[in-house]
Amino acid sequence: MQRPSENKTQNMTSGNSFKQIVLFFIPLLWGNLFQQVYSLVDSIIVGKGISDKALAAVGASGTLNFLILGFVIGMTRGFGILFAQCFGREDHAMLRAYISAAKRLCIGISLVLSVVCILALRSMFMFMQTPADIIDDAYIYFVIILIGIEITVLNNLAITILQSLGDSKTPLSAMIISSLANIVMDIFLVMGLGIGVAGAAIATVLAQLFSFIYCFYKIKMIDIFDKKNYSDVEVNGKNITFELVKIGIPVAFMNSITAAGGIILQYFVNLMGSGYVAAYSACMKFASLFEQFGMSAGLSMMTFVGQNMGAGKYDRIRKGVRQGLLLATILNIPLALVQILFPEQLARIFLSDPEIISYCKDFLPILGISLFALGWLFVYRYSVQGLGNTFVPMLSGALEVIMRLTVCFTVGRASFRGIALSEVSAWIGAFIMLMITYYVVMGLKSKA
């Protein structure tokens, strides 16, 4: 019996570039939004179903989550650059070799990280000056997340493989399945069984498992991964693991360096007390939601640029990046206006204390005004990565930390508004750096 063939992969090296970018972007955006939805539902259930302090505890673990999980997830995203380039030049044997090595790397690294981080976790929270009244819940929540880190990493690798091959629809379907499962399990475990933040963490890990199973099945159905289509001679004479590490580790460190900047902000917020921690957690939930539009535009560019880089089509890359910038700009106009005009209404979704809500009214409009810089940052960052240069984006992450530190020590220590200014200063600095890098790299490609 012949197995069914999946034809959702898309070669982006020819045809209408803007149409391809938009068609790839739409499912990618919806997938990222669904991911945010179950994060938002998680926060609403924790905040309203347990307490504001429980929400603060989950929020306090968010920066560590980004630091640790962001490292391995960033690494898988870096692997995707090589996957896309191989697919663009139709080198399927090398693509299969890269994916096989990537699976082994992800399993090994995630296991080591899980053990090391669980042992050091309480010390990390204490170093961050996490308030004493939320540290126990924060610890319980994140230990469970770390136990499931391998599931999360393999799920992200599977999604990266599909997206690198031009398929953003299957990850969307997976995200819908996992989001619905997460909502149901959240309600059952947190509000039904009453097991607190542990229930929210368990629901998140299980949702990732459902997504991975679905994506893995779909990958096995793609023709180029059918063993009947393998060439007689696969890849020889090339250190596949080294190539993956060389391009993946800078992306991983970029994520972790950027997360370190978030930890700096969390440190200063923690010093202000649990009320400000709750306000900051709520504000960053909206920041994470709204940034998905620019991030999805940027991720679309990484696949588009990566495939066309593999095919050597530089003029097409330039045209596509211009279109990506336009897309990000148009999308961010209404999102910026919502944050500027309706900060109190947004805050009330998560919070009930009027004083804590007032903190958000100072914070959200500043993020809204600067949202355009963040969208452009994502487009240039992922375009530069798609070109195969992951080192400069890593440096841009370091620049973000420097900008956050500088503003935190000058204005951030004085007010909650200063914390917001330190966040947006990091976006603007990294955007300028990556924009210059993109045009320099493309100029060198033209001369070559």
Image (tube, rainbow, N blue to C red):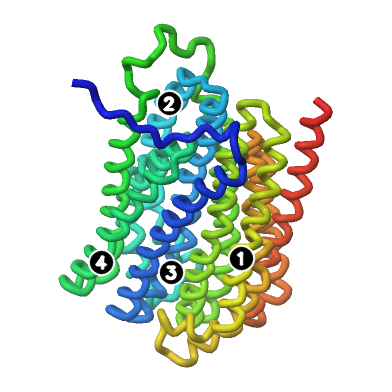
Q: Disc number at residue 186? A: 4
Q: Earlier in the sequence, mark 1 or mark 3?
A: 3
Q: Nearer the viewer, mark 1 or mark 4?
A: 1
Marks 1 and 4, how far apart at CA? 31 Å
Residue type at tag 3: Gly
Marks 1 and 3, how far apart at CA? 25 Å
Residue 391 showing in the rendered view = yes
Marks 2 and 1, how far apart at CA? 38 Å
Density class for disc 4 (Cα within 10 Å; few <14, some 14-19, many ≥20) is: many
| 324 versus 340 height, above or below | above
User: In the picture provided, is 190 more to the left or to the right than 227?
Assistant: left
Circle 4 SS class:
helix
Q: Are marks 2 and 1 in contact (CB under 8 Å)?
A: no
Q: Nearer the viewer, mark 2 or mark 1?
A: 1
- Which residue matches tag 3? 59
Marks 4 and 2, how far apart at CA? 35 Å
Along the line of sight, the residue nearer the viewer: 314 or 86: 314
Q: Earlier in the sequence, mark 2 or mark 3?
A: 3
Residue type at tag 4: Asp
Q: Quadrant of residue 156?
A: top left
Along the line of sight, the residue nearer the viewer: 33 or 287: 33
Q: Quadrant of residue 350?
A: bottom left
Circle 1 SS class:
helix
Q: Disc number at residue 101? A: 2
Circle 2 SS class:
helix
Residue at position x 61%, y 27% from top?
A: 310
Circle 3 SS class:
helix
- Which residue matches tag 1? 332
* Percent of width and height locating residue 415: 64, 82
Residue at position x 52%, y 18% from top?
A: 239
